[in-house]
């Protein structure tokens, strides 16, 4: 599938790369399908690119690359909704905005 992206122009992706957010993401509830693309070859940053809006691409990365002691708790309800069976099957990403992690 060929998509139009904010940072890379046209990109070919595979169906299995598509990430579905059934409730959207905060502030963008109508955006439900995304793909994660590298920002550049050597960068620790990635792009969470909307499939429905080519102008919408968030810069994301693992918080653990920047903060060794980064921790968070997931409510058991969230774990159930996400159907998490093994913590090793989950990848944590944060959205960067003007150098601030949200």
Image (cartoon, helix red, strand yellow):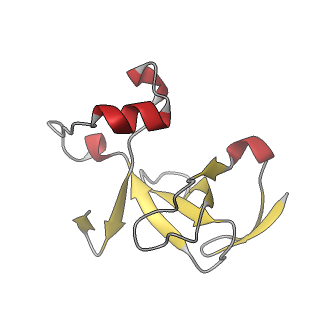
- Whether residue 39 is visible here, answered yes or no, is no
Q: For the point 83% across and 63% down, which residue is it?
A: 2
**Left or right, residue 39 beside residue 88:** right
Residue furthest front in the image: 77
Image location of residue 17, percent across then percent down: 69, 45
**Left or right, residue 22 beside residue 61:** right
Q: How many discs mark residues in the rendered view?
A: 0
Q: For the point 35% across and 36% down, which residue is it?
A: 77
Q: For the point 26% across and 62% down, which residue is it?
A: 102
Residue 8 picture quarter: bottom right
Image location of residue 99, percent across then percent down: 25, 69
**Camera-nearest residue between 16 and 9:** 16
Image location of residue 18, percent across then percent down: 68, 49
- Whether residue 50 is visible here, answered yes or no, is yes
**Camera-nearest residue between 4 and 45:** 4
Residue furthest top in the image: 86
**Camera-nearest residue between 53 and 79:** 79
Q: In this view, does 56 lie above or below 36?
A: below
In which quadrant will I find the N terminus? bottom right
Q: In this view, does 80 lie above or below 33?
A: above
Residue furthest bottom in the image: 55
Residue 62 picture quarter: top left
Q: For the point 28% across and 76% down, which residue is it?
A: 98
Residue furthest left in the image: 69
Image location of residue 30, percent across then percent down: 57, 71
């Amino acid at each position: 599938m060929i998509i139009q992206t904010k940072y890379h122009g046209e990109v070919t992706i595979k169906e299995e790369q598509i990430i579905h957010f059934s409730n959207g993401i905060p502030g963008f509830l109508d955006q439900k399908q995304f793909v994660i693309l590298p920002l550049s070859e050597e960068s620790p940053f990635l792009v969470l690119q909307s499939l429905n809006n080519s102008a919408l691409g968030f810069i994301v990365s693992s918080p653990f690359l920047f903060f060794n002691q980064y921790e968070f708790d997931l409510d058991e309800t969230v774990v159930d909704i996400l159907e998490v069976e093994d913590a090793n099957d989950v990848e944590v990403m944060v959205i960067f905005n003007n150098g601030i992690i949200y």
